[in-house]
Amino acid sequence: MSRLALLVLPLVVAGCAGSSPLVATDLARSTWAERCPGSTPDLAYLRLDPDGSFAWSYSDPNAVETDSGDTWSVEGTTLTISWNDGFAVTTYDLRSFDTGRLQGSSTKTCGDTASFERV
């Protein structure tokens, strides 16, 4: 096998392997729309801050405010959003981002219909 083939083969294999799941550094400093069909309200905008807290708004992704007790974390391939010191917790499978949004489930209002999409 030629040297060029040895250099190119790993790139081709990596490209065919599919995209890898998002990690915490991909998420920090980004704003997302969390949708919970059938809930009131059914949409919240969240900005995930690097310190593990998040700011949120029900109406405007550019007008989010921090509220103590709201946190996010990534463990393995799971993103966890915890509202009000764990009163409501939503988990998302980071491997589901191939669809353009994360699919998840919630302990409270969203049930199994939660979705998380980058704004």
Image (cartoon, rainbow, N blue to C red):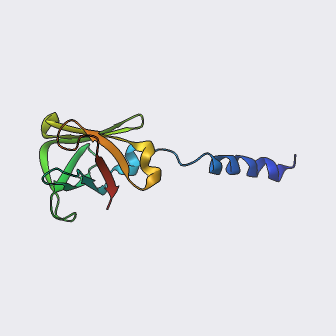
Q: Residue at x 24, y 40 (%)?
A: 111
Say whether residue 52 is visible.
Answer: yes
Say whether residue 22 is visible.
Answer: no
Residue 69 is left or right of residue 100, and the answer is left
Q: Residue at x 45, y 43 (%)?
A: 95
Which is more toward the observer, 118 or 39? Answer: 39
Occupied quadrant, residue 43:
bottom left
Q: Position of residue 27 (x, y in %)?
A: 36, 50
Q: Residue at x 21, y 35 (%)?
A: 107
Q: Position of residue 2 (x, y in %)?
A: 87, 49
Residue 1 is left or right of residue 13, and the answer is right
Which is more toward the observer, 19 or 40? Answer: 40
Residue sticking out furthest to the right: 1
Residue sticking out furthest to the front: 38
Residue 104 is left or right of residue 95, and the answer is left
Q: Position of residue 102 (x, y in %)?
A: 37, 49
On-image quarter of the C terminus:
bottom left
Vertical placement of 78 versus 37: above or below? above
Q: Residue at x 18, y 54 (%)?
A: 42
Q: How many marks?
A: 0
Occupied quadrant, residue 77:
top left
Q: Position of residue 30 (x, y in %)?
A: 32, 56
